[in-house]
Amino acid sequence: MRAETQNIVADIRKSLDLLARRMDYETAPHRLEEFNARVEDPNLWDNPENAQKLMRERQVLVDAIETYESIKTDLNDNIELIELGEMEDDEEVVKDAELALKALKAKAAKKELEALLDGEADANDTFLEINAGAGGTESCDWASMLARMYVRWADKKGYKVELQSETPGEEAGIKSVAYKISGHNAYGWLKSESGVHRLVRISPYDAAAKRHTSFCSVWVYPVVDDNIEIDVNPSDIRVDTYRSSGAGGQHVNTTDSAVRITHIPTGIVVTSSEKSQHQNRDIAMKALKSRLYQMELDRRNAEINAAHEAKGDAGWGNQIRSYVLQPYQMVKDLRTSYETSDTKGVLDGDLDAFMAATLALKVAGKSRSEARADG
């Protein structure tokens, strides 16, 4: 086997090792048996939310097992073909198997990165917001180009895209737009896109055909679901019950069933007065947790929001990527230094390489931190 092919095989095996460790392959069959037993429980769908969560978790495990076993089988089959071709001096068989291994390496590397999307909310659906920066029509047009880019990327992934809101520009383009993008790992992939995106081009709105620089900010945050844990210290809340107002007559509420929860550190107040006191407590706590989570998201986004108000290049401290269309063609990520001259492909939604490079950079940093801790 040629040295290059040996290296490819080694890389695939490294990816397989990571995939196995991520899903704990040794216990995976037993966990799948447990899932299957629970799925057959006739009372499963008495609680639809728990049932749906169970089905999602089961499918993730099934996909992980099938991916690992498929790559492992293809690897072994192609190694055997190469050995057979070399024994029989059949160069055609060897070349075909080597090409198959190269494709398998790319597939394994992609699956490895997907397996590394194990953050708290990585598997969730996501909201994506785009806001035009200073620059009037130029920035509004750039915002519409970015919106098209992300919608095309999502379409290629098979994700569902729903328009949440849109504010058109005064002359062209859009001032702001928000989408909900639904699909497995939608947030995990898109979270690396948060930041300021810079465009350099000859302006189609400038009669003098001068070069213009435009900025837009992109903000990505997850759709909160039951998988995200938000701890609320009981000593930080005050719960009050009161009599909810009604229509009068026989419908007058004669018990203190309505619930008001005040979060003392933040001053957030939430209420619920539609059902029983027990149900109202549950509803109000969910509302409080959602508000607290949104507050944390707002805190994380504070620097980007400040950049929205800034003027000129110096104000955009969160710039993550430059898209240069003039005087040369290049898209470069400033965090990873990954770049490509295929500007048309990127603006048509070919973003996976940029996202993968950012994810790999974070994983490498995490691995170095873990190594230092072990040492």
Image (cartoon, rainbow, N blue to C red):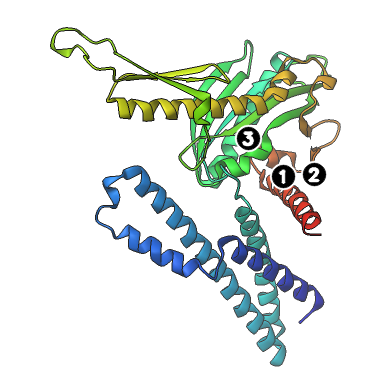
Please say whether residue 47 is visible from this viewpoint.
yes
Q: Give the class, few, some or many, for how many residues have Cα within 10 Å of label 3's Cα (few <14, many ≥20).
A: some
Q: Nearer the viewer, mark 3 or mark 2?
A: 2
User: Dot 1 corresponds to which residue?
Assistant: 354
Q: In the image, what residue type sits under mark 2?
A: Thr
In the displayed structure, 226 sits above or below 71; it is: above
Residue drawn at (34%, 25%) of the image:
280
User: Dot 3 corresponds to which residue?
Assistant: 149
Locate residue 165, reporting x and y percent.
Answer: 51, 21
In the picture, the quarter occupied by the C terminus is bottom right
N-terminal-most mark, 3 or 1? 3
In the displayed structure, 105 sits above or below 124; it is: below
User: Dot 2 corresponds to which residue?
Assistant: 336
**Quarter location, residue 256:** top left
For residue 64, which numbered disc appears in the image? Answer: none
Locate residue 358, reporting x and y percent.
Answer: 73, 45
N-terminal-most mark, 1 or 2? 2
Q: What is the distance, in whole Å, between disc 1 and disc 2 at their CAs? A: 8 Å
Please say whether residue 163 is visible from this viewpoint.
no
* SS label for mark 1: helix
Asked whether disc 1 touches disc 2, contact meaning CB atoms under 8 Å apart, the reply is yes
Q: Nearer the viewer, mark 3 or mark 1?
A: 1
Q: What is the distance, in whole Å, between disc 3 and disc 2 at their CAs? A: 20 Å
* SS label for mark 3: helix
In the displayed structure, 96 sits above or below 125; it is: below
Locate residue 220, reporting x and y percent.
Answer: 61, 32
